[in-house]
Image: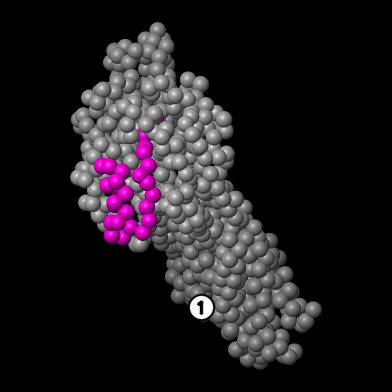
Amino acid sequence: MSALGRVVRSGTGRRRVQTVVIALATMMAVTASVLGGSLLVASKSPFETAFKKQHGAHLSAQFDAAMVTQQQLAALAATPGVTGSAGPFGTTSITPKIKNLSLAPLSVVGRDRPDGGVDDVAVTEGRWVQGPGEIVLSADTGILARLGLEMNFPSLPGAPTLKVVGFARSVSRTADAWVTAAQVAALTPTGKTDSYQMLYRFSTADTTAQMDQHRIALASAAPDGALQGARSWLSVKQVAVRDTSLFIPFLVAFGVLGLIMSVLIVANVVAGAVSQGTRRIGILKSIGFTPSQVVRAYIGQALLPASVATALGLVLGHLLAVPVLSETSDAYGTAGLTVTPWVDAAVVGGVLAVVAVTAWAGAWRAGRLRTVDALAVGRTPAAGRGSWAAALTSRLPLPRAVSLGLARPFARPGRTMVMLIAVLFGAAAVTFAVGLGTSLNAIMSARDHDAADVTIGVVGPQFGPGVAPRTGDAAEIEAAIRAQADTKASYAMATTNATIPGKAGSTNVYAFTGDASWGGYVMVSGRWLQGVGEAVVATPFLTATETHVGDSVTAQIDGRSVTFRIVGEVLNTRNGGMLIFTDAGSLTTAGIDLPPTSHYIAVKPGTDVDAYTTALNSQLQPLGVTAAAGGTESGSDIVTILNTLTVLLTLMLVAVSGLGILNGVVLDVRERIRDLGVYKALGMTPRQTISLVITSVILTGVVGGVLGVPLGVAVQRMIVPSMGDAAGLKLPAAVVDIYQPAMLLALALGGVVIAVLGALLPAGWAARTRTATALRTE
């Protein structure tokens, strides 16, 4: 090993604290960067690759078959901007049964071939339909089916049965299932095609404005009112990349915080090593080391632990990316997604380059030191630094050890500033993490709408008929609820599914009897329901249907068309946000009679909920239903992963912050060990020594905490709405502005906790140092 290599190895081993600090700070930055970079790539490339390969449709349009002919639709291919089209394909909505179990309605398209130049459907299992009595299911429907399974349709003329012969995937999400073109008529009650589907590709389709222009042009070229609905590929893409995109904003925040802390801590460690090793630098130069070699030695002492930490950070980043990437691994029939190699290379090169440049900036002073000056200087700093602060604190009515500790930060203002910034970012990370977790919980509460004190018939998310129990007469249940003297308010809810013309997949419909405005529904815009024919929908529904509050939308429910006027936008993520909340009268008017499947009750203030539930159940027992205390509650895999990653990354940042304090205090204690020896000789006890060292970081912790909390709040208010945008949600102030004064005060005190925890080890070391040993140190 060369002389330079031995110097690097000995310096790294001798400064174990500094080595650990550099390693952990670097590992934190690498882990967050690998996660953020890999998810950024994974959230885009699978969809774009599949869309290009399958010639995805830029626009999927649904036309009313009663208002337009196939010849007129074929002529629309000449509309300016259209570069390719497929169709017309007959469509209908059917509700299948499997062994008497009703499923959600399916949007079915009649298509004899899976290809055609636009939206080439990829068969993932089995084969394509070849004749009547066969059906191919979309792999994205979520139906647990197998090849050869028979699906019954007892509500259709002749009660047909279709056999599942294959599974396929349309990157444009154009249907839930496919049959032959001739089969469509047999699957409609009237024997006539309900509507036609046309698929288009355009020369320009990169922005929402461009897609709106194309949709308007098609609607103008077709007979008035013929276009029932249209879906842009941009909304499909947004849904496809939503889960992985959700992680990117907060990972970027952690990555930036980690990288900034890494730069600061590496700079502080190297600067401290140069300051503490001034005499050693002089010795190295006296035995022939050039200034360049001295600089390289200190850079090497930073790069060696940073390189090991980089490798560990890569491994940890890959392990943490697995559960997140698995969310998109089979979205398009691709193999399991892994971290892209160029992301690894970019992160490794970038982080090590930052460490090297930062270390060089700190080591440059070592190369410029004159040999004679370095040999003549000990490591005890010159007297007089911070003397004004010591004189000021000595007048305070405090124990002398405490007053000495309070003055210590002013002796090394540069080092104190680095320690303060470390605490600041640690407090900011904790503040951000607490705010993020609270906001996510608020979003989950909004999704669960769990404001009810007592519920009846609630078994979790209702995604179709027959899920919730229907025993008991609704009128008798409502009478029993009203008979309870402590009932404050109540409402009932019926659930069903609907299809929206031009949109694949089912939409959940929730029909209320009674005022449900108090049920925990968080409004984003507009207002809550006030009458028949009105609907409140979630943001993803507006995006998918390209509608706004104030527009009308038509849904197919149980073979009937129901038109709703959208009066409000609600925060809800169930079923991907494809939800319609309406009054039960809206369905009754259309001839759809749905019995309530669940009841929600609010009790008067001060009521014993358990006693109320027991009394209500005594009346409900003859009806075969049971009341339960508490509202609905459910979890989310995405939220669980987000919370887990947040806790892990926050702990790493707090650990880095604490080690930054540890490094600064170690350097300070070692520089002033002779002063401590003098204090001990004058009678300072070990307990007073510990008090002195810990007190020296209290002011730093207070200031860092006070400054870090506003930074954390600002990051939370920037990142949470960005995460909402990535998920296709608009977040109201109720789930963003969640900090309370008591919470902010506690978070500010967290800076003091970080500083004290970082100072405990060096304080113990200083207390255990013998007086004679300290006095001999130079």
Three-letter residue code for mark 1: Arg
Write down the residue under mark 1.
385
Residue 266 vertical placement versus 557 (above, below)? below
Q: Residue at x 43, y 60 (%)?
A: 708
Q: Is residue 85 left or right of residue 40?
A: left
Residue at the far top in the pictured view: 622
Q: Residue at x 64, y 68 (%)?
A: 306
Q: How many C-alpha atoms fall within 10 Å of the one at disc 1: few (<14), some, or many (≥20)?
A: some
Residue 60 vertical placement versus 16 (above, below)? above
Residue at the far front in the pictured view: 71
Looking at the rendered image, the quarter that the N terminus falls into is bottom right
Visible residue check, residue 674: no
Q: Is residue 574 left or right of residue 403?
A: left
**Closer-to-camera residue (385/269):** 269
Q: Quadrant of residue 773?
A: bottom right
Does the magenta run of residues contain 88? yes
Residue at the far right in the pictured view: 1
**Closer-to-camera residue (552/382):** 552
Q: Residue at x 44, y 24 (%)?
A: 160
Residue 91 vertical placement versus 160 (above, below)? below
Visible residue check, residue 769: yes
Residue 90 vertical placement versus 646 (above, below)? above
Q: Is residue 326 left or right of residue 545?
A: right
**Closer-to-camera residue (123/398):** 123
Q: Is residue 616 left or right of residue 141?
A: left
Number of dots carrying numbers: 1
Q: Quadrant of residue 713?
A: bottom left
Does the magenta run of residues contain 83? yes
Q: Position of residue 351 (x, y in %)?
A: 57, 69
Q: Position of residue 711 (x, y in %)?
A: 40, 60
Where does the magenta region start and end?
A: 68-94
Q: Position of residue 142 (x, y in %)?
A: 49, 36
